[in-house]
Image (cartoon, helix red, strand yellow):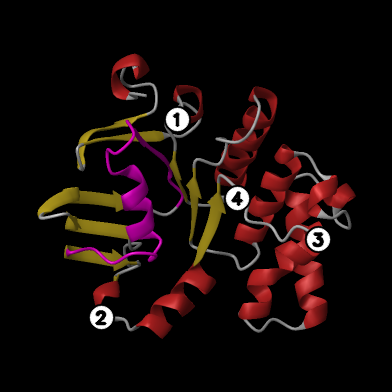
Amino acid sequence: MAATLPVVRLEQIRKTYAIGDQEVDALDGVDLTLQPGEFVAVTGASGSGKSTLLHVVGLLDRPTSGRYLFEGEDVSTLDADSLADLRSRRLGFVFQSYNLLPRTTAVENVELPMIYAGVPDAERRRRALAALDLVGISDVAYHVSNQMSGGQQQRVAIARALVNDPRLVLADEPTGALDTKSSQEVMEIFARLNDEHGITVLLVTHERVVARRAKRIVTFRDGRIISDTPAGAAPLDEAVPV
């Protein structure tokens, strides 16, 4: 039986930005492998490189140097159209600000990625309703965004990230705009999707309690990984700076 390819393999990834007449390494020689079915929290202080990492993994930004393999494919060889196609078909995104269309129903928001992917109307609606049911809010499928709480809106965003059956879900501070109860509920959804459905999740957060819900914690400082441990293997007061 052939070995399963990692979803993500980063080899000596560097991302450099010019600030005035100086160059700053947002990522400084990062090596990281993500296997299918993992739930990884990336954490660290503001400016440590965690969001830059998410942008590189999500194909929203190209590294300055290094090698990035997505399911064995070197993405540096892909043109802009091929990258956009890979993003839409194999990656799902969840953002802190939800990014929902404000006067559009939950089910219509969830359908958006499938429109771009060319999925027929009836199949779009079926899959969107199934995704909303999966995250526990099928009862608000026909409510518009401003009729929903922040927690409900984030669940819609998670459902939208899932509808194209992505290989990897990327979440950027998904609880940052939520109260404690809603944050716990959203993290329970991510944990259940990972445990029961085997969905691979890479989540960026600066919150200790959020990082604890992952199975592996990768901590950044000054563009480098300073620790990579199973959740609970190290004291979080040390491993997860704020």
Residue named by callout 1: 211
Which numbered dot is residue 103? Answer: 3
Res 238 quadrant in image = top left
The answer to whether residue 7 shows anywhere in this view is no
Reply yes or no: does residue 52 show up in magenta. yes
Residue named by callout 2: 77
Specify start and end residues of the magenta stretch as a single range.
37-64
Circles 3 and 1 in contact, beta carbons < 8 Å: no
Mark 2, Cα crowd under 10 Å, few <14 / some 14-19 / many 20+, is few
Which structural element holds mark 2?
Answer: helix
In the rendered structure, which disc, 3 or 4, sits on the residue that comes first in sequence? 3
Residue named by callout 4: 197
Which structural element holds mark 3?
Answer: loop
In the rendered structure, which disc, 3 or 1, sits on the residue that comes first in sequence? 3
Q: CA distance from mark 3 to mark 1?
A: 33 Å
Which structural element holds mark 4?
Answer: helix
- Nearer to us: label 4 or label 1: 1
Mark 3, Cα crowd under 10 Å, few <14 / some 14-19 / many 20+, is few
| Closer to us: 79 or 229 | 79
